[in-house]
């Protein structure tokens, strides 16, 4: 019995995201100025930055934290992944987070990092657990809501800010949670979720 979702359809999309993030980090000095989220350049029409900006990181520690998060989320919810669903959720959450930051946080001129998008994946995965009658989904959902609420009221950890050498964009975490909920709701409403997870498969991976 496989303990982890190791089928190609479950692994490929998060693996590609990891590879792109690592390449972006390695080429940071060469391409950073052209792809990171930058409010001024977006206003000038460089709209691709609302997606590509999420792929960059402030330093190696920042990249490692998000790499570990991608792997952890795959271990938790990879059985629900498909290339289509994973890609759509990444694009949807990237666009929504960037749009929300642009609209409601005009003081934030630059933003990089996958943490907001990963919050979307976390919430979406917890809701998929609930959809398939896995009670741990409720615990995960409540936990991330408490975590994000704490950040909104009391701010992010100073230790994390020091580690990544930047302010923690708690606004991105909030909008990541919101975008994950909306994406899940839309997928259910319009029956566009193509994961097609069978009950037996779910049981095998628990």
Image (cartoon, rainbow, N blue to C red):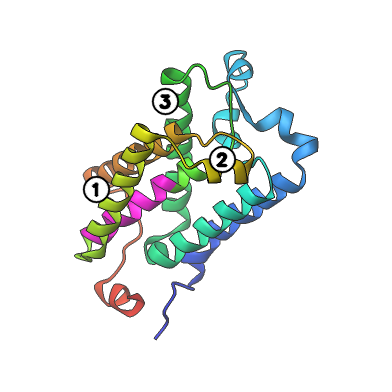
Which element is circle 1 on?
Answer: helix
Picture quarter containing residue 185?
A: top left
Q: Position of residue 2 (x, y in %)?
A: 42, 82
Q: Residue 203 magenta-drawn?
A: no
Q: Position of residue 30 (x, y in %)?
A: 80, 36
Residue furthest to the top in view is: 44
Marks 1 and 3, Cα distance to the nearest angstrom? 23 Å
Please tell me which of labels 2 and 1 falls first in the chain.
Answer: 2
In terms of secondary structure, what is the magenta stretch mainly? helix
Picture quarter containing residue 24?
A: top right
- Residue shown at 48% from the left, 36% from the top: 94
Magenta region: 119-130
Is residue 47 depicted above or below 59 in this figure?
above
Is residue 39 depicted above or below 60 in this figure?
above
Please tell me the numbered disc located at residue 100: 3
Q: Which residue is mark 1?
A: 188
Please tell me the numbered disc located at residue 161: 2
Marks 2 and 1, Cα distance to the nearest angstrom? 36 Å
């Amino acid at each position: 019995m496989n303990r982890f979702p190791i089928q190609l359809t479950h692994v490929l999309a998060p693996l590609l995201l990891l590879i792109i993030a690592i390449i972006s980090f390695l080429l940071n000095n060469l391409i950073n100025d052209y792809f990171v989220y930058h409010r001024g350049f977006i206003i000038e029409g460089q709209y691709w930055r609302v997606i590509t900006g999420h792929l960059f990181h402030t330093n190696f520690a920042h990249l490692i934290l998000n790499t570990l998060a991608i792997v952890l989320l795959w271990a938790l919810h990879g059985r629900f992944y498909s290339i289509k669903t994973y890609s759509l959720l990444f694009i949807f959450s990237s666009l929504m987070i960037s749009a929300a930051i642009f609209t409601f946080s005009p003081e934030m001129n630059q933003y990089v990092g996958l943490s907001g998008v990963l919050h979307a994946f976390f919430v979406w995965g917890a809701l998929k657990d609930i959809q398939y009658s896995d009670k741990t989904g409720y615990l995960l959902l409540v936990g991330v809501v408490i975590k994000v609420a704490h950040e909104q009221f009391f701010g992010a950890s100073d230790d994390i800010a020091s580690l990544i050498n930047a302010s923690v964009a708690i606004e991105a975490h909030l909008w990541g949670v919101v975008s994950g909920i909306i994406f899940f709701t839309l997928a259910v409403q319009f029956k566009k979720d193509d994961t097609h997870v069978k009950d037996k498969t779910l049981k095998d991976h628990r």
